[in-house]
Amino acid sequence: MSDLRKPNLFIIGAMKSGTSSLHQYLNNHPSIFMCEPKEPCYFVHPKQLNWPNMKKLGLWGNEEKYLRLFEGAGEATILGESSTLYAKEPHITDVAERIAQFNPQARFIYIMRDPIERTVSHYWHETRQGNENQSLLTAVQNNPLYQDVSNYPKQLNHYFQYFSPDQFLFLTFEELCNNAEACMTKTFEWLGVDASFAPENLSEKFHATPKQFYQKSALFRLRYTWPFNQLASLLPKKIRSSGLKLAVREVDRDKDAEDLQEAIQFLRPIQLKQTADLSNLLGMTFPDWKTLYDTKN
């Protein structure tokens, strides 16, 4: 295992804030190697990892297997991964401490989005996956996960117990969308790699939730279980295809504008206070968060 290198860069979130695009843009740089899968979740305890595909990797407690995700890095000086579960305190715990024990010199990128828009996007992501059946307003009121992931100072203060703020680069989803080239130049400069390099895929956006989509049901998710797969293998392909069609339903995000506005009105005072705390913590302002500040018009 002596020839295997440890990752030294972690994009820890925030979920639904452009981490997939950032991961791909970084991976285009000849001095940077970003692993696949994008989110190995190595530092998440299995009891808190509700993600079948990542559980199948069996990385927990197996450092060599984790490091082998980076063995194709070649001459790259920056080795990274982008597990957004790493910034979901208190739902996913002790990640910062584990990374500190693993590599105390690690560096982090934390990309933040207008917290209202991030919260709403998170809700639609969970709805699409079949994990959420409540209305948007009810969900953000009753499930603390949505608000906690958007509580950026809360997430960062936990990391600052183990790492210096100097080990972090703070970006916003809005700057990545509005001027990806300048955003990546800043990122490359911070990483100490050739900042003149221009990724060819800057016009591509990765892993965005569409306006219209099919929602997966509990029946759809059963397809990942061993008993279901054994049973399905005995059925004709036509019947299997028909069953999967019954397991999804079409969702149009634009249909319930009233619920969206009610959710925004509920979230705004909470997240304005959190953003004020974030500004004090980082010495940054966020004028592009137009939904939060109600400055879209």
Image (cartoon, rainbow, N blue to C red):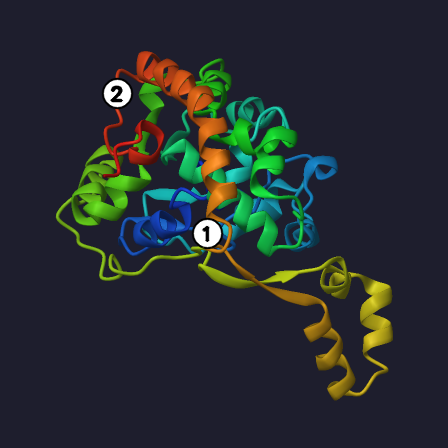
Residue 10 seen in this snapshot: no
Asked which quadrant contains residue 91, the reply is top right
Tell me the tag on residue 35: 1
Which residue in the structure is indicated by mark 2?
284
Please give the name of the residue rendered at 49% of the width and 23% of the height, measured from the top-left corner. Answer: 155
2 on left or right of 10: right
Label 2 to label 1: alpha-carbon separation:
30 Å
Which image quarter is the C terminus in? top left
Numbered disc in front, either 2 or 1: 2
Q: Secondary structure at mark 2?
A: loop
Please give the name of the residue rendered at 45% of the width and 55% of the height, measured from the top-left corner. Answer: 254
Foreground of the two, 244 or 33? 244
Q: Residue furthest left?
A: 196
200 on left or right of 141: left
Give the number of marks. 2
Please give the name of the residue rendered at 44% of the width and 59% of the height, measured from the top-left corner. Answer: 211
Foreground of the two, 153 or 192? 153
Percent position of residue 233, x then y: 81, 79
Q: Secondary structure at mark 1?
A: loop
Answer above or below: position of 177 versus 100.
below
Please give the name of the residue rendered at 62% of the width and 37% of the height, measured from the top-left corner. Answer: 139
Tell me the tag on residue 289: none
